[in-house]
Every structure is written in structure tokens, then in C-alpha cells.
Amino acid sequence: MRSLVEVILLALQLYTYLIIASAILSWLVAFNVVNTRNDVVRAIWNFLDAVTEPALRPIRRILPNLGGIDISPVILILLIIFLQNLLVRVMQQYIPPTLL
């Protein structure tokens, strides 16, 4: 049981890193540091967009327009941190120490 929770926690942590990478890449594109006409940049952009956009889209629909500032990645990361903490607490509370 502990192994399953650890795999879930690792997946959530990796997803958090992907969200951060997506936000950083969007800033780099917005400030013309990197160009999406570059094949490598476009491939990374498409991958990060395909992975993160399904989770970010519902949050963006709920949030009001903040004039070009997108805080949906921050909210999603906070939700992931909350979920990670919840999983750790549930694991500590309901799984006997002999199984940990």
C-alpha cells in the first residue's frame, strides 16, 4: 500500500515540475527569448501543452480575467500540494506502522 501512495506522490511531484516548465516556457515565448518556429521548442511546447492544458483549462474557466496574468498554474500547484499532504496524512493515519 505504501508503494502505491509513494508512486502517486512521485507522479504528482513530476506533474508539478511539468506545470512549472510550461509556465516558464510560456514566459520565454512571450518575451521572445525562444521562438516557437524552432522545431525543438515547438515539440516541447506541444508536449507541455498536451500534458498540462487538460488540468489548467477548467481552472481558467472559473477564474476571472486578470488582464493577461494567468494564475491557474499557481492554483493547480497549490491543489496538488494539498492533495499530496492529504495523501501523506491518510497514509499515516490509516495504514498500520508495521506496513509502512
Image (spheres, rainbow, N blue to C red):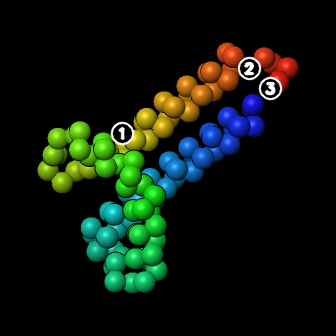
Element class at badge 2 = loop
Compared with 47, 93 (above or below) is above
Outermost residue, bottom direction? 38
- The residue beneath circle 3 is 100
Q: Quadrant of the N terminus?
A: top right
Label 2 – label 3 distance at C-alpha: 7 Å
Query: Which of the two marks, 2 or 1, is nearer to us in this view?
Result: 2
Task: Indicate the amino acid at tag 1.
Answer: Ile
Q: Is residue 39 left or right of residue 64?
A: right
Circles 3 and 1: CB distance less than 8 Å?
A: no
Nearer to me, 11 or 75: 11
The first of marks 3 and 1 along the sequence is: 1
Task: Indicate the amino acid at tag 2.
Answer: Ile
- The residue beneath circle 2 is 95
Q: Quadrant of the C terminus?
A: top right
x then y, percent, for residue 4: 71, 37
Circles 2 and 1: CB distance less than 8 Å?
A: no
Task: Indicate the amino acid at tag 3.
Answer: Leu
Instruction: Tell me the number on the disc at residue 75.
Output: 1
Nearer to me, 15 or 74: 15
Q: Residue at x 69, y 16 (%)?
A: 94
Q: Residue at x 50, y 35 (%)?
A: 81
Element class at badge 3 = loop
